[in-house]
Image (cartoon, rainbow, N blue to C red):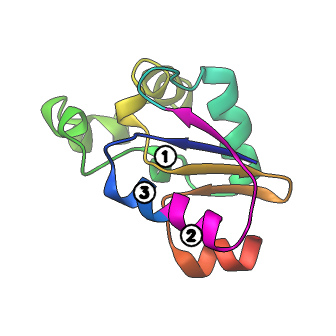
Amino acid sequence: MLLVCYPKCSTCKKAEAWLEEHGLCYEYRDIKTQRPTETELREWHTKSGLPLKRFFNTSGLLYKSMNLKEKLPSMTEDEQFALLATDGMLVKRPVLIGPHGVLVGFREEEWEALL
């Protein structure tokens, strides 16, 4: 499994602790220094079954400063993927890529159901 996180994010820390408590092995990737590529984001989106909007860190400073709440509805999916790939801080975290799917954000019940 691959856990894509931001080290200073408290939700990411909770997700890491949860994985460790459950004895699950994972590879860690810093979303800021190794941002997801557009190809990865497209693959993760497909595997997740989630709406693309769920991949945006809507509570992040960058999202707010770019006024994306207003801009996203008029953007094409291709434009949204390209935008997400420009900066890891735009991506909601943590992202867990596992053998049975992709989870975005940390909701314990979702993680338990998938893992």
Image quarter of residue 41: top right
Apparent side of residue 75 relative to residue 102 in the rendered image (left or right):
left
* Magenta stretch contains residue 115: no
Q: CA distance from mark 2 to mark 1?
A: 21 Å
Residue 113 point in image, percent of width and height: 72, 79
Question: Is tag 3's residue or tag 2's residue first in the polypeptide sequence?
Answer: 3
Q: Which residue is found at the position 62% from the left and 73% from the top?
A: 21
Q: Which mark is residue 13?
A: 3
Question: Is tag 1's residue or tag 3's residue first in the polypeptide sequence?
Answer: 3
Q: Which residue is found at the position 77% from the left and 70% from the top?
A: 115
Q: CA distance from mark 1 to mark 3?
A: 19 Å
Apparent side of residue 15 relative to residue 90 in the rendered image (left or right):
right
Apparent side of residue 113 relative to residue 14 in the rendered image (left or right):
right
| Viewer-closest of 1 and 61 | 1
What amino acid is at disc 3?
A: Lys
SS at badge 3: helix
Mark 3, Cα crowd under 10 Å, few <14 / some 14-19 / many 20+, is: some
> Which residue in the structure is indicated by mark 1?
55
What amino acid is at disc 1?
A: Phe
Q: What is the span of residues highlighted in magenta in the rendered image?
A: 15-30
Mark 2, Cα crowd under 10 Å, few <14 / some 14-19 / many 20+, is: some
Circle 3/circle 2 CB separation < 8 Å: no
> Which residue in the structure is indicated by mark 2?
18
Question: Is tag 2's residue or tag 1's residue first in the polypeptide sequence?
Answer: 2
Q: Residue 38, relative to residue 113: is it above or below?
A: above
What amino acid is at disc 2?
A: Trp
Q: Which mark is residue 105?
A: none
Image quarter of residue 50: bottom right
Residue 52 point in image, percent of width and height: 53, 46
Which residue occupies the extreme right position in the image? 99
Residue 105 point in image, percent of width and height: 48, 59
SS at badge 1: helix
